[in-house]
Image (spheres, coloured by chain):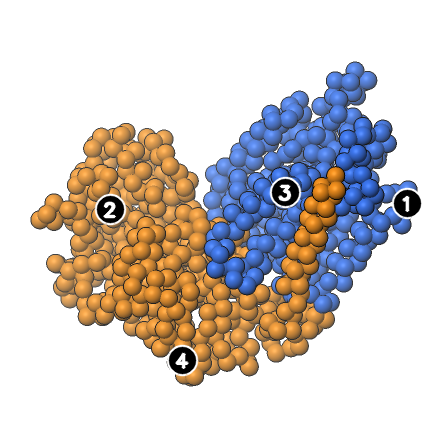
Amino acid sequence: MNSHATKARWLLAACLVSIVALVASGCGDSGTTAQPSDGTASDGAASDGAASDGATDTGGSGEGDDVVRLGILGECEGPFGGFHEDTVAGVTLALVNHAGATATSETTALDGWSGAEVNGTPIELTGIGCGDDTPDTILGEVRQLVEQQDANIVIGPLSGDEGIAVAEYAEANPDVTFLSGIAGSQEPTLEVQAPNFFRFHGDGAIWNAGLGDILHNQEGWDTVAVIADDYSFGHTSAAGFIADFCGVGGDVVSRVFPPLGTTDYSSFVQQLPNPDEVDGYFWVVGGTGTQAALEAFVNAKGDLTGDQHAGNLFFNPGLASALGTDIAGAYVGGFAVLPGDIQTPEITEYLASADETWDTLATGLTGGEPGPPSTAAGFGFMYGYYSAGVALVRGLEETGGDLSPEPLQSALAELTLELPYGDISLDENRSGIVDVGLSRLVENDEGEIVQEAVAIIPEVDQTFGGTFSTDTPPPSRDFPECQEADLPWVGNAIPVEDGVPQE
Amino acid sequence: MSARRPLSPGNLVALAVLVFLLVLPIFGTEFFVNNVMTEVMILGLAAATIVFLASCGGMTSLAQLLFAGIAGFMFGNAALESGARGLTLGWPPWIAVLFALAVTTVVAFLLGALGSRTTGIYFLMLTLVYGVIGYFFFAQVVTVSGPGGVTSITAPAPLNGRVPLYYAAVGLSALVYLAFRAIGRTNFGLALQGVRDDPVRMASLGFNVPFHRTLAFTLAGFVAGLSGLLNVWFNGQIDPASIAIGPTLILLIIAVIGGISHYEGAWLGAFVYVGASNYLRELPLVDRIGITPDRFNTVIGLIVVLIMVLSPEGLVGIAGKGRGWRRGSPRARSIEPPTTSETMEGTAR
């Protein structure tokens, strides 16, 4: 009994100690890290009064700030959890290439960097948030970065629904500057319109611009069935294709929306029309779902013919390993980067810089195993964060290293970034106007499936010539409707032959 | 805590904790007060309903987060004036609060009535099914939510600041804590405990067993709805992922960590959970031993396993053991058959 009692006493003591430690770590740093945004006193009494007006005025780059405390919203869990390394690597590479930083480790980006500086203003990594594709989690993480770790600039998030939540958080925290990582939903900029939320990349709709034009006018598709993940990015991506395909005169005869994270797609595939009833299918099914959905299609509807299929960025040559070479002929929408066979000196230099910065990186593209850093750098997730990092550096150069919210945010809004995969400027809602690279899966001489660029659609913005605006609802299961429209890029597509744009 | 001895040690500790929480905004950091402690209070409130059902009624419910979610969704639909998501009814916010609580309570009553004849593992499974159905309902029915949820929600005045929200969460928590304890001593509470211990005998004595269970479930649903309102004001948005199976289990885990037969345990468990999720990463060298934020669930899992092994009654149970040790014979006390008054009054200490 004595030993039992002693154990209980020790447990009680351990419990109390851990609670006291937690309270201490929460309360004890009040004077050191609490950073008022507006230059008011940071003592507790002031914080009480200041916070009670509803504004969440912690963190932020006050007038006296001379260090960029950069928080990165990564994605270490959930459907895109494999791309955590990619997110931090993108930002790090931008600072290595443009702000004189040195990566701390040669095998992981998560250890951060040292020596980043722009016009005398150092850029320090204050923390890495860990999202899981849900708004609740990313809100907790961004609060942690801004209000506990005192970040004054935040880069991220990665995923669509997270982007909306972070943009709304940005709206409530005007002194913190937010640069979207690669969140591809439409609403963060078109609906929320927080003046301190900048997106130097396109959205899911933009990345499919021009695809419908090619499929309808070149491939002769008149009718199409769309199957898309049932969440904001899936809706946005499908909306871009539908607006484009219908805009040039095609017809969408069926829309099916399986929930994100579905593993058995057979019941959803059954809802699609048969191959002889429709000219083609457009797939917006992400992650591991792409292959599972296509396999369900083969089981339900018979063998694939690549000519009858197209997909957004999730279509890739890797599908051939499970589906065979029948997938050849399928068209693929763009992502933040151009297809891999387009090689310019800028792209080559950019990819080489990634390989010089790290020996290996365990990124999402290499399945979490150590692989060449340039593989990840050539994919949209890392490149989106890279673009945000470059934007931060260029913005600071414009302000002469001044971190104050007003000049920095004004400078960012006016920037035109010269990036390896094309220049990016912002529209009036601070969303990127970007070039989109469309491609096709083809069989090469060795019988392997490779991705080949077919066209570049220049300077696409998120309004699609008026189809989407602040007055229209966000993309959903039934918006946009299928109707003809004037699309700004029809006839302006730059064809690509053998990886060379024919300008 | 004892009503007959107002100055008992338990009452004094509870009072001290309350005073500490009330003055905390004066010296705590904004992050600690407005994020960590507010979330602790919100989660504790929801977990307390699990404790109430389990300790008083012998029902372990996995549907409590659903009721919190229903209240949140209903408030968002009723209060928002414009926007792309939900019904955007644009009602006055306090009317929306009443509407949200009314809908939540009615749904809890109906679901409670449906499940009132099941017990044990079947009740657990049934409430899990409620949770799953609720998740898919809000994910699929775009009229009230859809997969993207309802966003841009603000709290009604005067709660539309972060410190007022904290005080609202503390106030409601204190109120609910006292109310749950008081209910245990009412005729209804005593009958409910009788239903928990021997439903057949209670039925033969003339008590309507299913009705008592239904009422308890309804009350728990209402309180979970209060927590859901606070949560949706705290986060400014709610989406189906907020009430998915993962967060549902986390709420149960919070109740287990604290001690599923003690009301204090609900908030204590929430404190450990929220504290660990926010501060574990800041401990020195913790990332060197592999405890990065993405391993957080592993750590929480280990804490739960540890608690299950060392003290099935959770952290409060550990504290209770400590008290018992000081009195001399914890084990002897624990194997004594409970007296009638202990059963009736001390079930949820």
Asked if labels 2 and 3 touch by Cβ distance under 8 angstroms, the answer is: no
Q: With respect to residue B318, does B130 lie above or below?
A: above
Q: Nearer the viewer, mark 3 or mark 2?
A: 3
Q: Which of the two labelled residues, at mark 1 and mark 3, occupies the earlier sequence position?
A: 1
What residue is pinned by disc 2? A318
Give the spatial CA distance, label 3 vs label 2: 45 Å
Q: Indicate the chain coloured blue by its letter.
A: B
Q: Nearer the viewer, mark 2 or mark 1?
A: 1
Classify residue A207 as left or right of residue B303: left
**Chain A in the picture: what colour?**
orange
Looking at the picture, how far across and down is residue B205, in whole percent? 82, 17
Q: Nearer the viewer, mark 4 or mark 1?
A: 1
What residue is pinned by disc 4? A118
Q: With respect to residue A307, does A23 lie above or below?
A: below
Q: Secondary structure at mark 2?
A: helix
What residue is pinned by disc 1? B5
The answer to whether dots 1 and 3 both sit on one chain is yes
Q: With respect to residue A323, does A63 lie above or below?
A: below
Number of numbered labels in the structure image: 4
Q: Quadrant of the C terminus of chain B?
A: top right
Q: Secondary structure at mark 1?
A: loop
What residue is pinned by disc 3? B307
Give the spatial CA distance, label 1 vs label 3: 31 Å
Asked if labels 4 and 2 touch by Cβ distance under 8 angstroms, the answer is: no
